[in-house]
Amino acid sequence: MIQTNTAIAVKGLKKSYKNLNVLKDIDFTVQKGSIFALLGSNGAGKTTTVKILTTLLLPDKGSPEICGFDVIRQPDQVREKISLTGQSTAVDPVLTGRENLRMIGKLRHLPDANRQADELLEQVQLLDAADQKVATYSGGMQRRLDLAMGLIGGPSVIFLDEPTTGLDPQSRKALWQIIKDLADSGITVFLTTQYLEEADQLADHIAILNDGEIIAEGTAAELKKLLPHGHIELKFSDEKELQLARNLLIQYNISLSKENPTMTITTDGSIQQMTAILSQLDHADITVTEFSQKKPTLEDVFLAMIDENHGEENALC
Amino acid sequence: MLTARVKNKISETMVLTRRSMRHSLNIDTLLTAIATPIMMMLMFVYVFGGAMDTGAIDHINYMVPGILLMGIVSGAIYTSVRVNNDMTSGIIDRFHSMPIARSSILTGHVMTSVVFNAFSTLLVLLVALFMGFRTDASITAWLLVIGILLLFTLAMTWVSAFFGLLANSVEGASAFSYPVIFLLFISSAFVPTDTMPGVVRAFAEFQPMTPLIETVRSLLMTESAGDSVLITILWWFGILIAFSIAAIQVYKRKT
Ligand SMILES: Nc1ncnc2c1ncn2[C@@H]1O[C@H](COP(=O)(O)OP(=O)(O)O)[C@@H](O)[C@H]1O
Ligand SMILES: [Mg+2]
């Protein structure tokens, strides 16, 4: 049974293209009014999942439900509830921003299509450019219009497939704010991304998709606990200092590079541990000439998760 | 009474036709579909006119049917470009994830082509009249000509839509226009077939452009088109049915 607070329910979802097994057996649920991020690198199967959920593609197995409607058997009802802002921008470059929004409003048979168009233009900060041809818009502006076109008619669930890929940092931040505001207004947001930071910033719940399987799932905080330890890199004035530091920090997991001379320390990623190391060196009068912290990347998470998966498989043998 | 569903479908088709119309109103399309046939007419009549022997009828009167068809082919070709642009951009996914009739997308493009070609043909015809084209055709003959040109427009539009759906790029989509224009030149559109060498002549007399040209020309000039009306309708109705079915199949397979 689907609970009433579930917006999207996916169970045992499978899809392959010819002999390429893209989605192996996917399960997840998305709560109403939350932001759910499907995180995965290129080719992981994100777009395939989005296409199935938005009625564009039939799965081989599993019938996902959206707002209680079956995606395969009730596509028309599902389409009434959702909107899609796909991976490639779906705006009409020949029309103006305002005309694009009005067109979608009229296709949805809204009696107040024009008013909604004006409101959305304001919401995505495009009022000034509203009557210019979309072909003249920057990438960030096109993406904001694209998002607004998905909002006209007030859908319950919106799908955003890599909404910020290819945008500059400033445009990305602007789009993040709009997405956060949406979730605050009660809309359920399903987004896909390749960036850990984006999922971290936006999502209430994150699922990591790798090679067609969900290898980890949880809140950002829960996932971070699964991250491999962070690394810090310290550079010293000469090899002697490096050796002194090595002897002082004997309790840590350290690798040395004598020519540089630098050392890399594996930490638990906490700031406390980092400052403890630096103050220990400071008290011993050892000068650190350069300091850098290596944040774990999405790839690190993948590697760690994949290692873990293999570990389990090996344990069975 | 129309059901709500049918009403919605009509309004969706109208919205998408308006959109497609906007795409057709650009310099490139207008130049190719309207200015080119007019330029050709000027050239054939004033430059090559003396060199071509087209029998008893006045030179311009002989040219006009071919020029009109040329204009329709040039106008209809752009359907492939517009359809292909939609298929290769994200917009088709947006439309398909919305609760609208899927048929409204292709129908919108087809309607645009018909409306656009009706206007451009009229314009070319007006220029022809200005240049001295004259006809004594009766209302019935005119109605038949309009009907046949409409059938030809629809058929060419669906041929164009088919290639637009099939191709992976805009360049590929419009490449089909070369053999079509070639067919037009190897017909009696601009020179009588009996001036052509044997094999070419046999081909010209068999292919679907020739009965079409002959029918339109006879209806406008002599009023008695005879068998060629039926042959023309059979040819082009067949092409229309075959390509619209094929186009819809490709559309379903690709989405
Ligand atoms: N229509 C298709 N036919 C064959 N293979 C496809 C098709 N669409 C996607 N794929 C393949 O499926 C895999 C997953 O693709 P996709 O879902 O687009 O990944 P993502 O969006 O995570 O980058 C990729 O290896 C891709 O090449
Ligand atoms: Mg993708």
Image (tube, coloured by chain):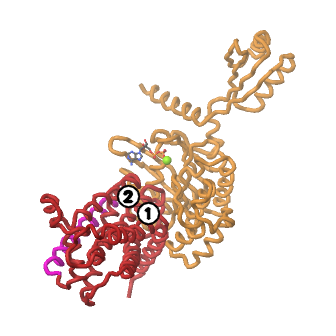
Chain colours: A orange, B red
Task: Decide if residue B154 is in sight here.
Answer: no
Tell which of A141 and A309 is nearer to you. Answer: A141
- Tell me what residue is drawn at x 87 percent, y 16 percent: A285
The percent coordinates of residue A15 (x first, y second) are 39, 47
- Give the quarter of the image for residue A299: top right
Badge 1: residue crowd in 10 Å (few <14, some 14–19, many ≥20): some
Look at the numbered disc 1 and give the secondary structure of its residue.
Answer: helix
In the picture of the structure, the residue carrying the numbered disc 2 is B255
Compute the Cα span from label 2 to label 1: 8 Å
Outermost residue, bottom side: B139
- Horizontal side of A195 relative to A232 (left or right) equals left
Question: Seen in the image, is A237 located left or right of residue B184?
Answer: right
Specify whether residue B241 is painted magenta. yes
Whether A303 is among the magenta residues is no
Q: Position of residue B177 (x, y in %)?
A: 32, 60
Chain letter of the residue carrying label 1: B
Residue wearing tag 1: B96
